[in-house]
Amino acid sequence: MEQLSAIFVRSRLLAIHCLIVVVGSSAFAQGLRRLTLDDLFAIETIGDVAVSPNGRTIAYVQRRPRSSARSVKLAVWMQGNDRADVWLVPITGGSPTRITDGVSDGSGFWEPKWSPDGAHIAMLSTRGNNVRLWLWEKATGRLIKLSDKGISRALAGLGVFEHKFGFGWLDAHRLVAFLLPEGARTHPDFVIQDAGALATRGWNNAWSGKESTNSTLESGVPADMNSRPRQQAVVFTLGEAPRVVGDGVELQDLQVSSDGNYLAFIRQSVLLRPEPDRPLPGRPRSADNRVGFYFARHQLTVTGADGSKVFEQAPGDGFVVYGSFRWARSGHRFAFLGARAGDGDDSTRLFLGEVGHAVIEISLPGLDPKQFIWLDGETLLVPAEANQRTDLWLVSSDKAPMNLTATMRVPPSNLHLLGHFLVGLADGELWKLNLASMTWVKLATTSKVSRFASVPSEPNYSSIIVELSNEVKKYYSLDLSTDRFIPIIRPSVEATLVAYSPITEAAVFISTERTGTSLAIVQRGQQPRYIIRLNGFLNEIAEGETRPFEYRGLDGQQLVGWLLLPPRNRTGTRLPLVTWVYPSRRYSREAEPGLLNINEDIFINLQLLAARGYAVMLPSMPLPGLFESKTAIDMNLELTKGVLPAIDRVIDMGIADPRRVALMGHSWGGFATYGLITQTSRFKAAIAIAGFSDLVSLYNSVIPRWRYFSYTDEAPFPYGQVMLEGLYRMDNPPWKDLGRYLRNSPITNVDRVQTPLLIIHGDMDHVPIEQAEEFFNALYRQGKRARFVRYWGEWHFIDSPANIRNMWIQIYTWLDEFCDISRDEKGELIFDGDHVKSRNGALPLKREDFARFNEIELRSHPWVRKTEAGDQRWEKKRR
């Protein structure tokens, strides 16, 4: 439910942006057009960027526009990589070369990984309607499919929307990958396709009456892991037959020793069953998440690249903490966090091992280790909690742990080992640990350090790229040997560093701007060199103005909201206002919300509302204690605190028409939309997209697209349990705290709704469509105005261009009807003095009218796709 923030938020310099808006508004009179629905489908993006080992060549992924997709439901989680190709470009100059040909058959190639000698690139591809491992050979330019089996692409880490691919190089001639069973496809990517195929097959069998369509789930018995499909760890040696070196259920977390001769991975060994007297695991930063993921427990396998077994935990021997295994910087020693058989979930131990030797436990009395870093072959630095504070402890097998940060106000985190130094961040301050003297030094910086923007993969390098952010984001190369900061030129204020080579001192930037998207290389002492520029057609489009504003919430908090104003905005007029809501968001003046950017390849681009004359407002909606508090919260009761005063502020600013205020939200924002219209009649119209309304029924619901697969009850527990008891802080099931579920469920107050409501939902959404059906049926039962738009085969995000186009036309007509909007024959707002003219009872525009407006705009500014060898761009059509 948080994916919109992970994908769409980026920073802007407000003064420069306002200058762009002024120029754009002036240029609008000279022929700039409005943003259309078809523009969304024309946007191209840049994906992964990888620098060759010698620092001389860049491999980058260029994603073709949504309109080019052969099947928009091919890959749910690929973020456009199913329509991507891999390109190469020299650092020193020259034109890009496309080394894959996904455009020929609608396939995608992405995730390029260079071999250590730079002679090959391993990558993933959807060619053949599965995700498989492919190899590009530099000497011949050939693309080679390494296996017919699909590659494991399981969910990874502690974030629901994070993925980790199971492949990597062992050395210049060998690589390892986790492969699926014969005929299996990557579940996250093809889940909607496969669910639809299974459902159709089952229905056909039922209709024929010749084959049972039985599918059985069990409760109250342990999961039979032996019946689960087994994956294989396979070593590919170039020019030789592949070798299976290990297997198991759901192989993940591949780790390779420094010499490439040994590898480690974890496998699922136990799937937890719910405990009636204990909340479900899944709350952020909980001990349960450290021990397992998605309610699984994992065990460790360490094996030789030749297939020889080194170490393998037997069932019942305990568990390894997900993602904790680490090899030493050199040699064959390793360590991991885990638990012994019989340990509780809150008990975590540190284990040390070496190839050819027994694994031992390192005693850490009174300490709860969170992670660790190898300093050398004997010593580890362990962030561990004691007395409700996490410090950094020096740990070895023959000495008592020593606290290295006891005197520091805030111990550093985000630690990286480079050369003979350890570097970390503490509240924006940069700290360096000298491993020879074991002393900390705070490095002086001109502003707050936001993050480490690039960390070299080779541990012998002693330089790192840091990002400093005050009003303007800046990048510096920091040499830890001299503590010298060397500035790196940014191509523009929008540019983000995505790759860096310490060998050639080449920095690679992606800039996603109002004028298009670009990839640029900057070498020390040189001006930026632009490799590609995409989406130049955006120069033809007038962009709405964005600006932050400050206000005070109902509980007295000082908050920041953001406004998006139409490019055709008339000075001195009050505009119809759409309030876009999402609980837990707390905006700042410096970081503009990504949904306001014109160049985002997303199905919800709020610039489309501005293009039709609406102002859009994004209020802050903080939820106190969401992640910090140890007690449950009532999120529904917090909704109005940041929203209603933000509306009042925008009205007081003379921007919003108080008679034409609407509400809209997606996902958690869809829940907020349901909740707000049960608590206030302030809005003339509301739109809830992919939201949930009944926490009681949601708790035990099943994700619809998983319904047709085996083990639905365990992959993972039903979605509502995960989100409600864990992330949304209900803390208990409804039968233990029914009152909290009822007062936080908008459905229980549906009789109070006075706002006309448009509901939009896909039948394959992980928020079950039944949540929308319940709310709509309750309004229908009362005769209240509502429209329920259902999209078959769609999930949480609407993917099909046809459905996206239909969805926006539904939105336009709904808002215009109930906000009492008058438009002329070209779709422009008609004003009566300082506000939009009322229709005075006349019929509103129909959906076909907005479809016609879209076509009129395209005909007046036509563009066509032009493809040339090695060059892809949008050009204006010549008549």
Image (cartoon, helix red, strand yellow):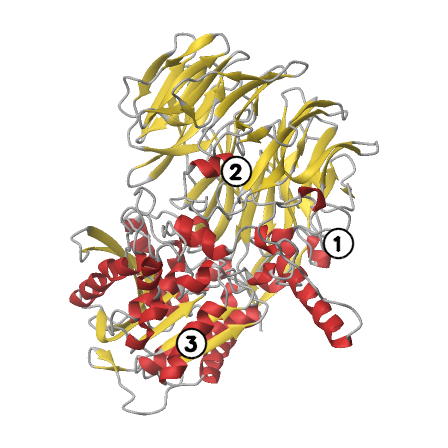
Q: Of residues 777 and 560, which is closer to you in this image?
A: 777
Q: Do we see residue 182 in this rendering?
A: yes
User: Which residue is label 2 attached to?
Assistant: 292
The answer to whether residue 618 is left or right of residue 164 is left
3D distance between C-alphas at marks 3 and 1: 41 Å
Q: Of residues 226 and 80, which is closer to you in this image?
A: 226
The answer to whether residue 174 is left or right of residue 625 is right
Where residue 29 appears, as percent x and y from the top left, is 35, 70
Q: Secondary structure at mark 3?
A: helix
- Comparing marks 2 and 1, which lies closer to the viewer? 2
Q: Is residue 700 above or below residue 677?
A: above
Residue type beneath disc 3: Phe
User: Which residue is label 1 attached to?
Assistant: 128
Picture quarter containing residue 316? top right
Q: Of residues 323 and 267, which is closer to you in this image?
A: 267
Instruction: Identify the image quadrant of the N terminus.
Output: bottom left
Q: Secondary structure at mark 1?
A: loop
**Earlier along the polypeptide chain: callout 3 or callout 2?**
2
- Comparing marks 3 and 1, which lies closer to the viewer? 3
- Residue 776 is tagged as 3
- Comparing marks 3 and 2, which lies closer to the viewer? 2
Q: Do we see residue 51 in this rendering?
A: no
**Earlier along the polypeptide chain: callout 3 or callout 1?**
1
Where residue 468 appears, as percent x and y from the top left, is 34, 34
Residue type beneath disc 2: Gly
Q: Is residue 310 above or below residue 39?
A: above
